[in-house]
Image (cartoon, rainbow, N blue to C red):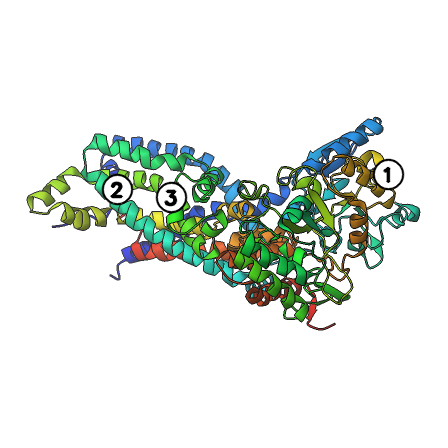
Amino acid sequence: MNSPISGTSQRAGTSRRLRTAVLAVAVVAPVCGSFAVAGVASAAPSSAPLVVWVDSTRVPMIKAYEKAFPNVKIDLVVYNGNANGSGVLQSKIALYNRVGSGWPDVVFSEENNDAASLANAQFHYPAALNKGLVPSSVLDGYAKGTMAGCTINGTVYCLRNDLAQNLFWYNSALMKQFGYSVPTTWQQWQALGEQVAAHHPGYLVGSAGDTWTDDLYLWPSRCPANDVVGPNTIEINLSSPNCTRAAALVDPLIKDGSVTLESVFSSTFDKTYTDKILALVGPSWYGADLFPGLVPKGDLAAADPLSWAGQKPATGEVGGGLWFMSSHAKDPAAAAAMLTWLSTSWGSQGISVGYPAYVADQTKWIAGQQASGFYSDQIGPVFATAATEIWPDWSPVPWSTDSIWASTVSPALTSGSTMVSQLAAYGQQLTDFAQSDGYTVVTKS
Amino acid sequence: MAVPTVPAVAGGHLNARRRGRAAGPAAQRTRKKGSAGYLFVSAYFVLLMAFGVAPTAYALYLAITSAGGHFVGLSNFISTGKDFRFVPAFEHIGEYLFIWLASLVVIVLGLALLLHSIARRVSSVFRFLFYIPGALAGAASVLVWLFMLDPSVSPWRFLLSGLGFSDLSQTIEPAHLPVIFAIIAFWTGAGGWIVVTYGALNNIPHELLEAARLDGAGAWQTALRVKLPLIKKWVVYMLILAFATGTQLFVEPQLVSEASLGQISPSWSPNELAYVLAFQNDNFNKAAAISVDLLVLGLLCAVVLVFRTKLFEVE
């Protein structure tokens, strides 16, 4: 084996091994590297027209703007509105940041946390509106407290389109027919649920199957799930009695069926629950968006948000849209003018599906809703009261508390677990997300 | 009974080359054939460099640098390794791969051997049937499965309700996901592999099977002791590719998560976690580190299998 041939054979062996390694890379590499080039794929749009991104619901508002200002050129892009923390907006902005161009000038988002997410140093997308772009006279015209989610360290990064304050919705005809009285406290609501389960099984007093279930029950209970208490410091304490009392209230009603685990927008919800909704705790937009078709015309009523006995009323919110303009806008004045018009003018808010955040539009908007004949009572006073009762310490944060709820608690509830037992897991996930985003987590403020 | 360990096609080709070397004019013809081979490969080579090797090199560069382009060593790998979503994502993929690869090898081989032993006309009908689902693109096949798994619309609702599932969220509980994704992957991918394995079986010289039969081997013995060892390299090849694509699962959990209104974590698989880090946290460097982790994992598996089975040895 010491012949010269063995050297040749060794070299052949080495080259074979090399070839083997190269081939192995060739086999594996094409599938591995595919996403890394995504960053260079997007092209920058033309700078001349205003590039506007909205969800399909907001398209009529843009059409109204085009009609009112025919000289402004608009390049309209319809996207999913970043709904349910989908992160589409963040994905695109990240790509545009990488390429250094292509950002939309004006964007609508359904995700309340987007100001916190997009304004942070990584994305640095929205323009600071209170620094000469939108006059303070306009900013002062929004309902008290409603711009809190848009304001970070004193800088306003977005304009609020509509409010999504939670109310107590009920079918007034059914309530009368069954002989129940409308609850004002959460304890009364639980008692109502138990009575309904016993005497009118199949009817609903609430739902807990949507991604925003935490906003319906934990937020109004002042549960410290995401209370930003200082710069980069957040209180997350799901073992607080404020959290456990809310979960313990809902659990028995899920068990007896008076609170459903189905999403109110699932394909089967209307089949199962048309004319079977006695009451739902839900946002103001349920009135125009969810209930038509589920509750007979003229039977729907709204009552003040439920409160905890002996405590000041507080409520939560589910969404409520935000208007952003880009800090990279080529024509900041034009973009700011459009943003202001969309969020404040009656020409835009008159066709908004949500309760306007801009006070001057609220009365007219309510009158329009009332004229539909869908409601059995006046909804204006309830909407106005609830708008001022949103608990402010459920802070906007760069992660979506709703999507964490959906992937942590919802599947466990579906498989028969209880909300009380899942709070710890939910709290742990919230803590993990906060820490990975650089927050210091405290359990007591 | 002596059993050759080289697939017949490769062996045949080598014999031709050896014969060509001995005979002068024939050797020239073979060399010409060789250069034609390079021509055929060149188109793929360009694409491989542009969309395979260059992005991989870019990912490697990103993985060892910071957002500002400074060299940071392994810190992106360490910080992603410590991320609370990292271990669960790899656990999910591990469960999924275990189920998928095991079922792929057993069922694909079983069906291919079965098809190879029945009449050619019948087997071609079955091969076509098995292949059809593979013709659907990845996303479309997941959508088909979303309908199949939703008890309110599924044609198999009696089966789903028999298992105790009354709506989609129950069917796609987190614990069921590795099995569900393995079924989807099998449904879309196995047909192609059955056809490939059948092709490999067809390359076994007829005389060899005839000899086995004359020596008294039954159908079972022929399948297990003659056919299987002969197509071992094809199985290894299938395993390498299936492992690499399996670790990079993305479309299935992403779509199921969308369809279930987020009931599945958006970082269920490592590739999804990379996507979240890149596009939700705007951190392409950490995302690249995870994609490099996957590359290394795929390469390790490939190299181990290649060397253990002498996959590329031709003599």
Residue B198's spot in the image, x, y percent?
27, 39
Image quarter of the C terminus of chain A: bottom right
- Residue position marked by numbered label 1 in the rendering: A337
Residue, disc 3: B158
Q: Could one spot residue B134 in this view of the protein?
A: yes
Mark 2 crowdedness (10 Å alpha carbons): few <14, some 14-19, many ≥20: many
Kind of element beneath mark 2: helix
CA–CA distance in space, label 1 to label 2: 67 Å
**Image x and y of residue B279, in percent:** 63, 50
Q: Which residue is mark 2?
A: B112
Image depth: mark 1 or mark 2 in front: 1
Amino acid at pointer 3: Phe
- Do marks 1 and 3 both belong to one polypeptide chain? no
Quarter of the rendering occupied by the N terminus of chain A = bottom left
Label 3 environment density (alpha carbons within 10 Å; few <14, some 14–19, many ≥20): few
Q: Residue at x 74, y 32 (%)?
A: A60
- Does residue A31 appear left or right of residue B273 in this picture? left
Q: Do the numbered discs 1 and 3 sit on residues whose CB atoms are within 8 Å?
A: no
* Label 1, label 3: how far apart the Cα atoms are: 58 Å
